[in-house]
Image (spheres, rainbow, N blue to C red):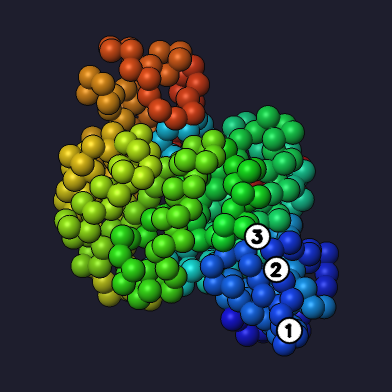
Amino acid sequence: MASMNQVLQRDTFTRPTRHWHALPDGRVQCDLCPRHCRLRPGQRGFCFVRANLEDQVVLTTYGRSSGFCIDPIEKKPLFHFLPGTPVLSFGTAGCNLACRFCQNWDISKSRDLDILADAASPGAIARAAEASGCRSVAFTYNDPVIFQEYATDVAEACRERGLRTVAVTAGYISPGAREEFFSGMDAANVDLKAFSERFYRKLTGARLGPVLDNLVWLARETKVWLEITTLLVPGENDSEPEITAMCEWILENLGPSVPIHFTAFHPDYRMLHHPRTPLATLQRARRIALRTGIHHAYTGNARDPDGQSTFCPGCGNCVIGRDGYTLNDWHLDREGRCRSCKKQLPGRLESGPGNWGSKRQGVRIGTY
């Protein structure tokens, strides 16, 4: 549990939450994620943004953001969801994991609400996304699970305007809360940090089991489009046996059509002296996934056009060519089938690609 840096008090950004219960000793237990933080009056949870105020668990960052940016959807990364289109991205503060390698640590590890400079209602976010030509809104930068009530309301406002919503998440959420959270999401990229309990305990402060359970639930019980990302940290989760075991589990439990992205680690946060991930490691992981039977495996955080392009699982031809986040080739028909063999490509595809490219564009929501 986090200690406070200021007196906790109710303000316009404080909202009641649903997933908690009172304990006999006067504390309240947050039931949102598997941590089940037990909070004394005035105490914040591990995530920092949920707290015990007036004997109930509240969200303290409703309507506050660390900033908004229009990104290519490929940056999430999502390669089979509205390819080439712009997505309005934002996050808040805090996180319910403690990844020592976090690459957004200035946001996710913040214990200072002053970084949340942008105030935005759900309706304002949806209006901004529509007016700026975005096809979707992404909850990212920090894990949206911890600001579920805000994300759910934003998703509803987006749906009213015909916009899609995307969760970029570690998937560390309790079964009792996941249905409500993901019911508003059209797509999710779940960070599968590793395939060992040792890694999760040592480097994330979490557990592997709940993440695997949620991946199975997403793939089998929902209509959310799912892709997976694994950041390969040299010497920690990049061995051939571990990657092979992970890919075999994905194939058996999620199926061959769930794409996986192997991305490169760079020294950051509390692992500043750890080596970067070589491109060869990413390429080896991709080969293992394809050899295992996964149809779509990608490399990321490194330039590798072949590893970032999409190939038809039927005939093997390139159907979406990419260089970084830029689409430079498209060989699908209007129904999303390979033009050569007519094999249907899995995903949420449209009659043609978007043309946003690799641009990033800051947005001030107050304008809307």
- Camera-near label (1 vs 2) is 1
**Residue 267: % across, % down:** 32, 67
| Residue placed under numbered mark 2 in the picture | 20
Q: Residues within 10 Å of mark 2 (few under 14, many from 20)?
A: some
Does residue 183 sit above or below 92 in this rendering? above
List the single residue furthest toward the bottom.
Answer: 25
Tell me if I can see residue 265 in this picture.
no
Residue 239 placement (x, y as % from top left): 18, 60
Mark 1 highlights which residue?
Answer: 24
In percent of width and height, residue 247 lies at: 27, 48
What numbered label is drawn on residue 147?
3
Left or right: residue 212 versus residue 364 is left
Residue at image location 31% in from the left, 60% down from the top = 195
Between the C-alphas of marks 3 and 2, the distance is: 14 Å
Q: CA distance from mark 1 to mark 2?
A: 13 Å
- Residue at image coords 63%, 57%: 177
| Secondary structure state at the residue bearing disc 2 | strand
